[in-house]
Amino acid sequence: MRSMRSLGSRIWEHRVTQLIVGQWFYIGLAVAVVLAYYFPNVGRHGGVISGEYTIGYGVVALIFLQNGLSISTKDLKVNIFNWRAHLVVQVLSFLVTSAITYGLCCWIKSSNDPRIDDWVLVGVLMTSTLPTTVASNVVMTTNAGGNHILALAEVVIGNVLGAFLSPLVAQMYMSTGPMKYGNPASGSSVKALYGQVLKQLSLVVFLPLIVGQVLRNVFPKQVKWTLETLRLRFLGSVCLLFITWSAFSTAFYQKAFETVSRICIIFLVFFNIGMYLFHTMTSFAVCRSPVIKRGFATRPGPDSSVLYTASYRIIQPFYFNRLDTVAVMFCAPAKTATLGVPLVAAQYGSDSPNLGKLLVPVVIYQFEQIVVAAWLVPLLRAWCRKAKPKPDLDQTYHDNISRPTTTTGQGIQTDMTHYLDEEPVKPSNYIH
């Protein structure tokens, strides 16, 4: 018995074993795609396990139930009313990403390269108009130690707005110009989709979140014990594997990847990675603008001009702390396939001969954003840890700082109330 334990210990401590354990999420993604390829009828929508319900509702709801158990009601209220962050995320998500993508699609279209299918470009543009994803941004923000409560709020706001804004933004780009050929004939069918969106958000976000909050407030000791004992830090990541498996099962079953060439697939892989990283860095630049930091380095004092004081109060709060910045970086560039697939199908018709080409960019982008985001998690986690706890400062200076109680990797509550990353500015003694 002792020799068996010794052998097991040596196997566990072996470098290869530790490498596999350390990269379990990426290995899990690969396994999920392989299983989806060979057994697409199991996890697909309408398949053996009815993936649209068991995965699309059940697994996603599990993620938000965990969040409901982990966050305090007070912190949730603070982040819901963080309108500055909501404004930044939604503008980046719906307008900035789509505008840049539209310009690139027009440039690629003008090259007249026959290897790049025109309808794949339309699918790329449609993907850029979609709202943020439902689950992966919350999971990745949590894993990185960012403000996952803010990410949760962006999920709700973005997807409620997306049913209206995504078709409007798509029409704006494809009503005229080089991409006009991709303009859907009618967007009237999208109206019926809004009820479906509200139903899904109610069941997978609102209901489990409320249940988690009720349990947390009624049974605080039991909830704390559950979070600490069960060590649920891997739950969100495991749920993402199931979501990826179901999405690819549906795509493989519908033979979506057979409608486009290998060159198009390769193009999409590299294009999506580049765009995701670019929009992530753009989000960082917007949230941590050096112009705001340097332009409003001094807190207004009694002798400051009215113009400077007013400008400071309006503009300076748009310089976000590290925890909120991480949430924005994961939410703004992310795109949802959960809403994206039915939204595209509703605009072009489920019997459209080009539907497969339109959906391939959506499915590939969803997979790649999870992979790239998981790669960024350790970097952003280390960056968040550099935020040092400081005493309460002037509320005017910090009225943009949300105060989340975040869950650590062990599922233990860590008070992040006073985590800031900037030295307090000093009141000015001169007129600006």
Image: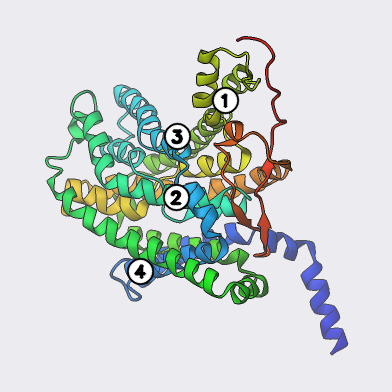
Mark pair 1, 4: CA separation: 42 Å
Q: Which residue is mark 1?
A: 289
Q: Amino acid at mark 1?
A: Ser
Of the image marks 1 and 3, the number of the one nearer the N terminus: 3
Give the quadrant of residue 253. bottom left
Of the image marks 4 and 3, the number of the one nearer the N terminus: 4
Q: Which residue is mark 4?
A: 51
For mark 4, does the 10 Å Cα neighbourhood hold few (<14), some (14 to 19), or many (20 or more) residues? many
Residue at horizontal 25 percent and vertical 47 percent from the top? 344
Q: Position of residue 98 (x, y in %)?
A: 35, 33
Display coloring:
rainbow
Q: Amino acid at mark 4?
A: Gly
Of the image marks 1 and 4, the number of the one nearer the N terminus: 4
Q: Amino acid at mark 2?
A: Ala
Q: Nearer the viewer, residue 402 or 96?
A: 402
Q: Residue furthest bottom?
A: 1
User: In the image, which disc is placed on residue 100?
Assistant: none
Q: Amino acid at mark 3?
A: Val
Q: Which residue is mark 3?
A: 88
Can you say which quadrant of the picture contains the C terminus? top right
Asked which secondary structure carries label 4, the reply is helix
Q: Is residue 247 above or below residue 124?
A: below
Q: Residue furthest front?
A: 302
Q: Which residue is mark 2?
A: 153
Mark pair 2, 4: CA separation: 25 Å
Asked which secondary structure carries label 2, the reply is helix
Residue at horizontal 41 percent and vertical 63 percent from the top? 37
Task: Tell whether 321 sits left or right of 248.
Answer: right
